[in-house]
Amino acid sequence: MIFSLLKVRKKTGATIGGLIIGGTCLGGLTYWQDINFIELTSIFTALVVMMILIIVIAIICNGVLILVRKTWKG
């Protein structure tokens, strides 16, 4: 894969690849449905923000669970 040449971890490469594939799919959808570029940018930005929020919420939940386990063990 091209990301191995860039010395990128597998998970990071998969994330970057997913974003590129998602952007390409949105570009094809835009061309097919005749959506202007501003709407496409808005949709893609909203998807990226949603993914970041999901990751942040997962990190917070994981942190809370770790704190609960540590206090439970005492």
Image (tube, grey):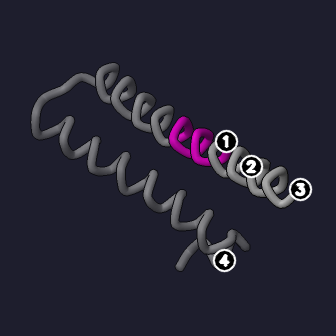
Disc 4 crowd rating (10 Å Cα; few below 14, some 14-19, many 20+) is few
Which labelled disc corresponds to residue 60? 1
* C-alpha span from label 4 to label 3: 47 Å
* C-alpha span from label 1 to label 3: 21 Å
Query: Looking at the image, which residue is at 21% across and 46% down?
Result: 28
Which labelled disc corresponds to residue 68? 2
Q: Which residue is mark 4?
A: 5
Spot occupied by residue 22 in the image (x, y as percentages of width and height): 35, 50
Amino acid type of disc 3?
Answer: Gly
Q: Is residue 7 magenta?
A: no
Q: Is residue 20 left or right of residue 58?
A: left
* C-alpha span from label 4 to label 2: 41 Å
Spot occupied by residue 9 in the image (x, y as percentages of width and height): 68, 71
* C-alpha span from label 1 to label 4: 33 Å
Quadrant housing the C terminus = bottom right
Query: Looking at the image, which residue is at 37% across and 23% down?
Result: 42
Amino acid type of disc 2?
Answer: Val
Which label sits in the foreground, 4 or 2?
Answer: 2
Q: Which secondary structure lies at badge 4?
A: helix
Which label sits in the foreground, 2 or 1?
Answer: 2
Front position in the image: 60 or 64: 64
Tell me which numbered mark, 4 or 2, is placed earlier along the sequence: 4
Q: Which residue is mark 3?
A: 74
Callout 4–callout 3 Cβ contact below 8 Å = no
Q: Which secondary structure lies at badge 3?
A: loop
Question: On screen, 21 above or below 2?
Answer: above
Spot occupied by residue 67 in the image (x, y as percentages of width and height): 79, 48
Which label sits in the foreground, 1 or 4?
Answer: 1
Tell me which numbered mark, 1 or 3, is placed earlier along the sequence: 1
Query: Looking at the image, which residue is at 45% across and 30% down?
Result: 45
